Image (spheres, helix red, strand yellow):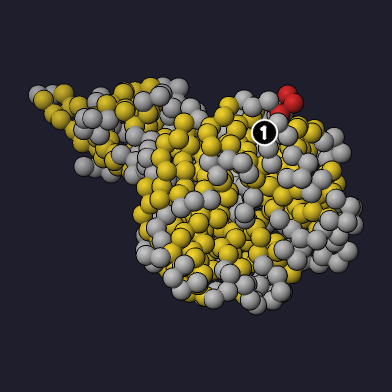
Amino acid sequence: MINHGIKNKHCAAFIVTLLISSTIYTVPFIYVADEQDTVTVIDGTTNEIVTAISVPPLTVTSTPTPFCIAIAPNGTTACAGVNQFDSNTSTYASTIALINASLSVPILTKTATLIASSPNSIRTTCVAYTTDSNTVYVGVSTGTSPSLIFPVTNVAGSPTVGASIPIPDATSSPTDIAIANTSNGETAYFITDAADMYYMQIPGNTPVALNTTGITSNLLASLVIAPDAQTAYAIGPDFDSGNGLIYTIDTSTNIITNLLSPITIPGETSPSGITTDGTYLYVTGAGTRNLYIIPINNPGAITTISLSAIGQPNCLTITPNGKSVYIAYKAGDVNSYPVPAGSPAGETISTVGSIASNSIASFSQSTHPPASVSGCKTQNTFLLQTDFINHITWTAPASGLTPVKYKLYRDAALMQPLATIPATGSLEYYDHDRKPNLTYSYYIVSIDASGSRSTPISITVTQNC
């Protein structure tokens, strides 16, 4: 399971690719952290706004501004990092807002405070989920030294803010963070506005600096991890040359493999993403107002798409189904483009609406299999005949899209359908006329109103009722 390519800072973007073995993706949803006090949710199939979620102020005189957002790998929650300014005391605070993302209309469920009050200009800059979806790591620029990373556990239940982790370079602030299961175990990577790169084993939580000697970027603004978790890409501008530079990190050795010869893009760049098959990097140029599409296997063959007719790109995300890239602009427009070729001359394929965005994230709500299944053997005898029966029961999934029916199969390939059971009735099935000395397996699939199916849950019946 990979939680990768998360963009978290102002004028940044988010990609969360949900690799859940028990689900099949259906409806993509896009979350936009607004410059106001809301998180806007967009249905990626219709490009209509589903809801606007208000983020609560810390005090009655505080103004909350969602600044970064991430979505759990299992799609159950979303976490927005929020900056709070209290106009009465002229103090700053850092909080997070947790959203139930498994509902058809998501709602705010909980908040947690990282730093309650400070005279310094605190900024919540980046957020990423661990691969088990239980913990978020949140970067906070404290306005003094050092800046901090906060782990927050049990985000789907009662969130607990853990001990803060200082950034080793006390003069820098975190700009982006991403987490993946690499060959070394679960690892967090984060970058800073001083062009530093760090990795941190989880749960060890001790930052280790990568060797960045010779790096020419003035700062690093964007970080993505490939779907196979073997490579990370750190992206930032070189103010002297006016170009954007992309550095490649081997996650098995934590060595920057192209330190002295990074991939070069015309114009200063920041928001970025990677396609779900890992074949293309997408990078926007705020100054050039271009979208750059970079083939991973041939980084010199860059495709450039002009966005100048629309405005300055602010953040982007690629949907988990790999079909669309959503770009939010400084002026407030949100548009979608096809992947991987982009749209001719930056033509707007679909305009979602005017949302003054700080950041954007996408995920797909899915149809889940039954939460549990059980089975037992029984029999009915009448005169000289015995009917051997397998009794199968299951429970509805706890999250995801609501099933309208369930389909039972006898084989793992789902080629031998057995029965279709409506979701409104008893979730059980009696399989009659079984052979007494054979062992039988059953596979159950959830099906939603659109016909989308989950992957199966299975059981082999061995116990007596």
Q: Residue 10 falls in which quadrant of the image?
A: bottom right
Q: Going by the image, does 247 lie left or right of 228?
A: right
Residue for point 70% across, 64% down: 192
**Depth check, front residue: 379 or 116:** 116
- Give neighbour class at mark 1: few <14, some 14-19, many 20+ (Cα, 10 Å): some
Q: Position of residue 355 (x, y in %)?
A: 53, 41
195 relative to 450 in the view: left or right: right
**Of residues 210 and 355, which is closer to you in this image?**
355
Residue drawn at 82 percent across, 65 percent down: 212
Instruction: Give the image location of residue 120, x and y in percent.
Output: 58, 74
**Residue at horizontal 86 percent and vertical 67 percent from the top:** 213
- Residue 12 position, x and y percent, is 64, 50
Nearer to us in this view, 262 or 360: 360
Residue type, label 1: Ile
Q: Residue furthest left?
A: 383
**Which residue is at a point 58% across and 64% down the rendered structure image?**
123
Name the residue beneath numbered marker 1. Answer: 310
> Horizontally, is 37 left or right of 439 in the view?
right
Image vertical order of residue 117 relative to residue 134, above or below:
below
How many marks can you see? 1
Residue 76 visible in rendering: no
| 54 lies above or below 438 | below
- Residue 257 image point, x, y percent: 83, 55
Is any atom of residue 249 visible in this view?
yes
Quarter of the C terminus within the rendering = top left
Camera-side residue: 4 or 372?
Answer: 4
Residue ranking furthest to the front = 88
Q: Secondary structure at mark 1?
A: loop
